[in-house]
Amino acid sequence: MTKITYQTLLNPEVTEFCDVMGNFFSKIERDLYKDLEQGKKLNDLKKSYQIKYGINARQFNSIHIILKGKIASRKECYQSQIKQTQLKIKGLQKTIESEKKKLEKLPLSCGRNQKSVRSKLRFTLHQKQRKLATLKDRLATLKKKKPSLVFGGKKLWYAQYNLKENGYSSHQEWLKDWKKTRSSQFTLVGSKNETNGNQNCQLLPNGTLKIRVPPCYESIFGKYYLIENVKFNYGQRDVEYALNNQQALTFRFVKKDEKWYIFCSFDLPETPTISEQKNGMLGIDLNPNIIGWSYCDSEGNLKAKGQIKINVRDKSTNQTKAIIGDAVKKLVKLAYDYQCPISIENLDFERKKATMKQEGVKYSRMLSNFAYSCFEQMLNSCAFKYGIEVIKVNPAFSSLMGLTKFMRLYGLSSDTAAALVLARRALRKKERIPTSYARLVQVDSSRHVWSFWNALNKKLFGIKRHSFFSVSNREVEVKLLDELHSNRFNGKSQDTFITR
């Protein structure tokens, strides 16, 4: 089941109640975290907390479930941090070895220009070795430390040590902001076995939200606190469907810009899959500034192609989501019209981002600004709604295959050619090396076909794929490949081609 969340703005009249509940629940959450870290048993804490704070069992369960999720998320982020540091070390070591080989090949000349080249290379090598030592120290520290959880955020916590730089005139002003941030949300988790999907927070058919007040605050707010006219401008029908079908509804209250919002989360109903591989496949090749797509029939023959330009550089988070969301809608609509699945790359973006500094400033900027995970999440969510299957395939040599095999054949750009390869791969079609390139590698029928592509990739090594963007779908790109052939057989050294 896929979860979906809708939000709406609450009336200003609920500010006092939500402020009190946010402060109350966050205090219990922090105390529970301390006790769990000390090794106390959860069942014993549940009984004692109900007496100590005057809450019911379901309210305690809600606090524990949210805290459990935060702890799991922090541990996952911590492991990801260690993994990225290890990948950075590995990439930097590879670069250092390459720079050392370059330095060894330089002649020991006293010429002015030659001396300058050697000096610059030695300086670069020295700085990279210093960076490597720093990363190794950081990795050792990360492995020794235990991941900690800061309620309110580390960024705001460290702001107290530089008050003026962070816009605070005094420590009291920072402390007020710190307390407000720590108590800016609370959650009431639901269950399908409870009335209206939630025992502590029920959305009634007339649009009234009925909240069970903790016993310790009944003297102030009464046993139940009612919020009238709660409607979701987007997703109201889905919420009503969840209520009518006895699904669990979880309500999260969040304060943003002095206003309280409510988020309702529940499971989406299963949508029947309408896409079939007999109708073909839609391949998608994702790049920092453009999305290439290609549609092929069940035999792998190209039937349609196109590009969707996106520019997320220097855009805010909401702007990036809006741009990617529009592109995702167009792609899913194409798949819906063709009644076919979607094929995308199964990439390890952690590895890609960890080593992007070695790829150059331009590529690093594009990669860091592009929301890869955002695209995948949106595509999966939108495709699920329309019953479109999303298939992930190994992207190995997809760019190389597209450039050498399909670009000239169909007159494609580099991204649409790679998208065609991904679509054919999802259909389990094999890609043999074109005859014009087969003479560059040694053929051995006992080996896997990818071994030939790997050998060809090593022969034609150098140019990164993004350098083809400005000349995609032009004669210049085809001529470049022709020059590779002629230069190879004329004995000239080559450092040009694309690698994934």
Image: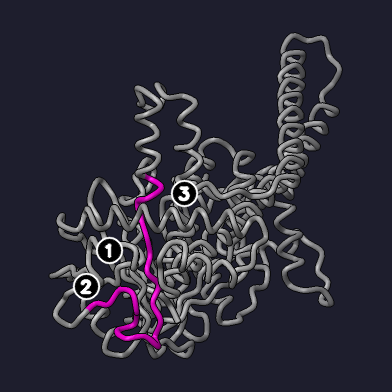
Residue 108 as seen in the image, left or right of residue 125 = right
- Mark 2 highlights which residue? 209
Residue 69 lies, in percent from the top left, at 52, 64
N-terminal of the pair, mark 3 or mark 2, is: 2
Q: For the residues carrying marks 2 and 1, which lies nearer the camera in this image?
A: 2
Q: Is residue 185 magenta?
A: yes
Looking at the figure, which quarter contains the N terminus? bottom left
Residue 310 lies, in percent from the top left, at 36, 53
How many marks the image carries: the answer is 3
Q: Secondary structure at mark 1?
A: strand
Q: Secondary structure at mark 2?
A: strand
N-terminal of the pair, mark 2 or mark 1, is: 2
Please provide the residue range marked out in magenta: 181-203
Q: CA distance from mark 2 to mark 1?
A: 10 Å
Q: Residues within 10 Å of mark 3 (few under 14, many from 20)?
A: some
- Mark 1 highlights which residue? 262
Q: Secondary structure at mark 3?
A: helix
User: Dots 2 and 1: beta carbons under 8 Å?
Assistant: yes
Residue 373 lies, in percent from the top left, at 48, 59
Residue at the (42%, 24%) spot, across then down: 163
Does residue 309 appear anywhere in the picture? Answer: no
Amino acid type of disc 1? Ile
N-terminal of the pair, mark 1 or mark 3, is: 1
Q: CA distance from mark 1 to mark 3?
A: 44 Å
Residue at the (15%, 57%) spot, across then down: 13
- Mark 3 highlights which residue? 469
User: Dots 3 and 2: beta carbons under 8 Å?
Assistant: no
| Nearest to the observer: residue 236 or residue 272 | 236
